[in-house]
Image: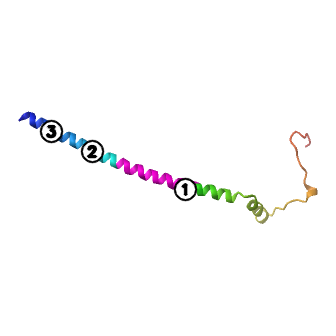
Amino acid sequence: MRLNLVLFAILVFCALGVVTSQHKARKLFVELQKDKDEARHLEVEWGQLQLEQSTWATPVRIEQIAGSVLHMKVPASGRIQPVFPGDGRK
């Protein structure tokens, strides 16, 4: 009789351990799925930001902003003086 009670207590303890570990595994799996969804969302957002950055940095847009906001103009070809590395002129 006493052996049966000891075995029953061990059985209950093991069953509770199995239930607890399954619950933790399910909880971690749900968390993993949420993290994967967030990673996918962040990848999409990263792609959109890269596309937006490439759009904002086009030479045509920069030239438009330089002209309209900063009032810059392309100088006449006679006023352009090229500078070469190691030229020695100051």
The quarter of the picture where the N terminus appears is top left
Give 87 or 25, whichever is nearer the viewer.
25
Mark 3 surroundings within 10 Å by alpha-carbon count, few (fewer than 14), some (14 through 19), many (20 or more): few
Mark 1 surroundings within 10 Å by alpha-carbon count, few (fewer than 14), some (14 through 19), many (20 or more): few
What residue is at 70 percent from the left and 57 percent from the top?
57
The quarter of the picture where the C terminus appears is top right
- Number of the label disc, if any, that sits on residue 55: none
> Which residue is denoted by mark 1 in the rendering?
44
Residue 82 among magenta residues: no
Q: What element carries label 1?
A: helix
Q: In this view, does 7 lie above or below 48?
A: above
Q: Point out the tag, 1 or 3, that comes first from the N-terminus.
A: 3
- Number of the label disc, if any, that sits on residue 20: 2
> Which residue is denoted by mark 3 in the rendering?
9
Mark 2–mark 3 distance (CA, rounded to whole Å): 16 Å
What residue is at 90 percent from the left and 41 percent from the top?
87
Question: Magenta residues: mostly which secondary structure?
Answer: helix
Q: Point out the tag, 2 or 3, that comes first from the N-terminus.
A: 3
In magenta, the rendered stretch is 27-46
Which three-letter amino acid code belongs to the residue tagged 1? Val
- Residue 59 appears at what percent x and percent y? 75, 58
**Based on the displayed image, in which of its 4 quarters is residue 84 positioned?**
top right
- Residue 27 appears at what percent x and percent y? 34, 49
Mark 2–mark 1 distance (CA, rounded to whole Å): 36 Å
Which three-letter amino acid code belongs to the residue tagged 2? Thr
What residue is at 42 percent from the left and 53 percent from the top?
34
